[in-house]
Image: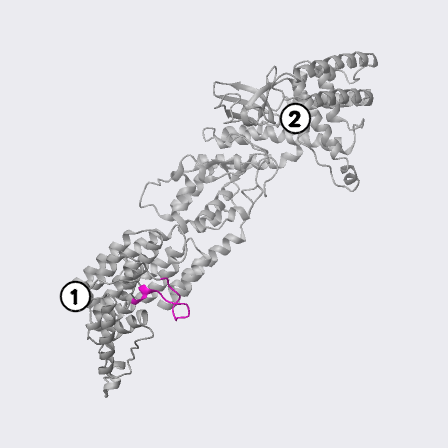
């Protein structure tokens, strides 16, 4: 039919119209029978609607729309055949179904024209002109995967025409928008109808071809309505985009050289697609430039450990042009899905971290094409292997944005719209991104904090570290770590506490390094807190061993007790052993308590009494009591300390006996105060302002009360908590 139209522009003669209509009724009836066969999911309502639609359309069609519509179709087909799409010919048509419970066929997902078929795989061309390769893992009727069935051309055409007519009916209101200079939207069903028309023409089905042509290129008998004109432009643009996709898809295959891709794109006829010409010409010029660079480039040996970092970064950025990555089922390309994994240029740049940032920022505006393909998301489910509308190519600058997002922890690629193609250009190329303010602001802020870290003293480090955790979470630990050994232990403990309070994947190795390598005992204790909170139970035994080794060597103990840089290191270590809620930790404190000077034994008792918890309203935050075995061990330690008359020496001894305990309190005084407050708050009061003799009498009464409660005496130091 199309060949006849190409040789004659007169269209159909009136005498042939009757024969055309008679044959059409016969073929429609035959198509109804075929459509009603099992597996086509046709219903009696659809058959009746088809008869009605066919009868109604016969009265509305005129010869003029027939001639114009078929001439338009002939021209479009003649151009379509030059674009390199697969030869359709006598091919099977299938449609994919979503299975229902019990293995029954569900609603059809999409039609496809079979290109090749193997035992467990099928390749087809969708009516969107997308080549799809599907794995067929489950038999027909299975609930595990989608299945396909054959469908005849008449039945497929009927459903597409039905959908197209319904869409036209539902969008009649757009004619008003046209008068307001707003172009009407076009349904993808136009493209589906055109592909079926091409199939019908190849199979010599003139009646079906004519019906599809009239529906495509006329609107209620009008061949020049705004909707028809818009549909023509849309189909030309869309078919061009599909044809161009195949050339850009070649970029995703590293086995195809850029020179070959360039030659293929240059062979594409742009005379019918002026809208695509600008983008394609941009790609041609860029590929010419890249081919020349490939020829003149001298590769750098990245395996050389002495290679300067700046040269290594520059070479990896150059290699980004061969970075691959495709995740079309999610609607965006991921440069980190390269088959080379950690050996890909993008992954190696992430490992280099901050050293690569300045050159990556320079590369953000680089328009050179990579081998990463991206595609717009679809509302309906598509196969993972499908290339959807339209394929776009990430540039080196786009990849640089992804890498900077990974390095910084900030989603710059989402703000730029790369993962949803908000900046996607026409026909496969992303629009220029330029230098992004968010990236430069992040880098400037990081540089500011690096300078602040270098300038601050021990106590100023806490403030800078707090801001870093809020503003630069990915690099807070890396930057702070460089200063921790330069500050005193107390400031280091406070800084480490900031990292204990947050959850970040980089914190565990950071805390482990501080636990084993820090020169400050306070920092080691703080790191142990953080690791223990994250489930690392082994740190308890490590800290027990550290306590025992420290107290078993007098020289090390004396050095720690006299340390000017870390005066509270032993206190923080003891606090961890109490807070870990382990009986063995409390027992090792009790065994080694006599090894400490009296003032440090008093400090240990202050830590041990916290095993009973703290109430809300005290100076410190509320703390839950420890487990019963730990509280019993703490009680026993305090009970045994009631006989410890060691006292804290000061340079200002009291002149009167009444003042002596205030200036030189004893270990037993603190032990009695903690026990009385815990067990007999209304019965005993330990006041360091009282005379020593009176305080000793109160302590002895408290001891007897504890013995009466089951502590000491015949129990040999084993007590009970009710």
x, y percentage for residue 344? 41, 38
Q: Is residue 563 shown left or right of residue 468?
A: left
| Picture quarter with the C terminus | bottom left
- Front position in the image: 453 or 511: 511
Please tell me whether mark 1 sits on a helix, a strand or a loop: helix
State which mark lies toward you, 2 or 1: 1
- Front position in the image: 119 or 17: 119
Q: Is residue 602 above or below residue 547?
A: below
Q: Main secondary structure of the magenta part?
A: loop
Q: Residue at x 36, y 52 (%)?
A: 534
* Residue located farthest toward the bottom when viewing the structure as drawn: 655
Q: Is residue 292 shown left or right of residue 514?
A: right
Q: Which residue is mark 2?
A: 192
Compare marks 2 and 1 and give the one earlier in the sequence: 2
Q: Which mark, by number, is residue 368?
A: none
Q: Residue at x 75, y 19 (%)?
A: 51
- Front position in the image: 404 or 37: 37
x, y percentage for residue 555? 16, 66
Q: Which residue is mark 1?
A: 555
- Residue 272 visible in the current orientation: no
Q: Is residue 609 above or below residue 691?
A: above
Distance Cα–Cα, label 2 vs label 1: 87 Å
Q: Is residue 240 above or below residue 587?
A: above
Tell me if residue 251 is in the magenta stretch. no
Bounds of the magenta span? 609-624
- Looking at the rendering, which quadrant does residue 168 occupy? top right
- Residue 309 visible in the current orientation: yes
């Amino acid at each position: 039919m199309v060949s006849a139209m190409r040789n004659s522009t007169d269209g159909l003669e009136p005498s042939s119209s009757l024969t055309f209509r008679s044959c059409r009724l016969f073929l429609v009836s035959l198509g109804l029978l075929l459509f009603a066969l099992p597996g086509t999911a046709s219903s009696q309502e659809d058959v009746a609607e088809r008869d009605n639609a066919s009868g109604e359309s016969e009265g509305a069609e005129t010869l003029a729309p027939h001639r114009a519509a078929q001439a338009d179709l002939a021209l479009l087909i003649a151009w379509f055949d030059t674009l390199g799409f697969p030869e359709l010919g006598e091919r099977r048509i299938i449609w994919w179904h979503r299975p229902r419970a019990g293995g029954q066929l569900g609603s059809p997902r999409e039609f496809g024209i079979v290109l090749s078929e193997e035992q467990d795989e099928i390749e087809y061309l969708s009516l969107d002109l997308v080549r799809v390769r599907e794995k067929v893992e489950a038999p027909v009727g299975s609930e595990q995967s989608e299945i396909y069935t054959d469908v005849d051309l008449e039945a497929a055409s009927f459903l597409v025409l039905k959908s197209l007519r319904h869409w036209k009916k539902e969008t009649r209101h757009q004619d008003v928008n046209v008068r307001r200079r707003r172009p009407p939207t076009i349904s993808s069903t136009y493209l589906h109808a055109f592909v079926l028309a091409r199939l019908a023409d190849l199979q010599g089905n003139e009646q079906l071809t004519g019906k599809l042509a009239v529906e495509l290129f006329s609107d209620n008998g009008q061949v020049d309505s705004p909707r028809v004109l818009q549909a023509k432009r849309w189909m030309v643009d869309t078919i061009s985009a599909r044809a161009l996709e195949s050339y850009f898809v070649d970029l995703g295959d590293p086995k195809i050289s850029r020179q070959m891709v360039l030659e293929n794109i240059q062979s594409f006829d742009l005379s019918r697609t002026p809208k695509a010409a600008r983008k394609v010409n941009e790609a041609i010029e860029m590929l010419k430039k890249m081919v020349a660079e490939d020829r003149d480039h001298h590769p750098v040996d990245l395996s050389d450990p002495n290679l300067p970092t700046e040269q290594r970064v520059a070479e990896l950025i150059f290699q980004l042009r061969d970075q691959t990555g495709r995740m079309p089922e999610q609607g965006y390309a991921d440069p980190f899905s390269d088959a080379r994994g950690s050996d890909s240029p993008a992954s190696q740049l992430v490992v280099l971290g901050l050293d690569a940032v300045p050159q990556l920022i320079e590369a953000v505006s680089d328009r050179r094409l990579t081998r990463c393909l991206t595609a717009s998301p679809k509302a309906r489910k598509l196969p993972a292997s499908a290339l959807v509308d339209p394929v776009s190519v990430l540039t080196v600058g786009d990849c640089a944005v992804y890498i900077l997002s990974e390095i910084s922890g900030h989603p710059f690629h989402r703000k730029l719209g790369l993962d949803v193609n908000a900046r996607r250009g026409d026909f496969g190329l992303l629009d220029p991104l330029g230098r992004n303010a968010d990236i430069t602001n992040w880098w400037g802020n990081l540089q500011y904090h690096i300078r602040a870290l270098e300038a601050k003293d021990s106590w100023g480090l806490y403030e800078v570290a707090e801001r870093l955790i809020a503003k630069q979470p990915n690099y807070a630990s890396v930057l702070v770590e460089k200063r921790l050994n330069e500050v005193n232990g107390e400031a280091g403990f406070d800084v480490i506490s900031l990292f204990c309070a947050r959850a970040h994947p980089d914190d565990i190795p950071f805390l482990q390094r501080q636990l084993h390598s820090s020169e400050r005992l306070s920092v080691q204790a703080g790191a142990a807190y953080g690791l223990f909170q994250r489930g690392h139970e082994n740190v308890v035994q490590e800290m027990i061993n550290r306590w025992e080794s420290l107290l078993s060597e007098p020289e090390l103990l004396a050095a720690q007790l006299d340390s000017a840089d870390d005066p509270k290191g032993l206190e923080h270590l003891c606090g961890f052993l109490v807070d870990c809620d382990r009986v063995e930790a409390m027992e090792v404190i009790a065994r080694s308590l006599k090894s400490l000077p009296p003032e440090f034994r008093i400090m240990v008792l202050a830590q041990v009494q916290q095993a009973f918890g703290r109430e809300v309203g005290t100076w410190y935050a509320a703390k839950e009591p420890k487990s019963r075995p730990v509280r019993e061990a703490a009680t026993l330690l305090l009970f045994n300390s009631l006989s410890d008359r060691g006292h804290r020496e000061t340079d200002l001894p009291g002149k009167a006996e009444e003042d002596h305990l205030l200036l030189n309190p004893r270990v037993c005084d603190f032990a009695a105060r903690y026990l009385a407050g815990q067990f007999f708050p209304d019965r005993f009061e330990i006041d360091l302002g009282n005379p020593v003799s009176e305080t000793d009498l109160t302590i002895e009464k408290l001891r007897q009360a504890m013995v009466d409660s089951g502590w000491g005496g015949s129990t040999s130091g084993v007590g009970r908590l009710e």
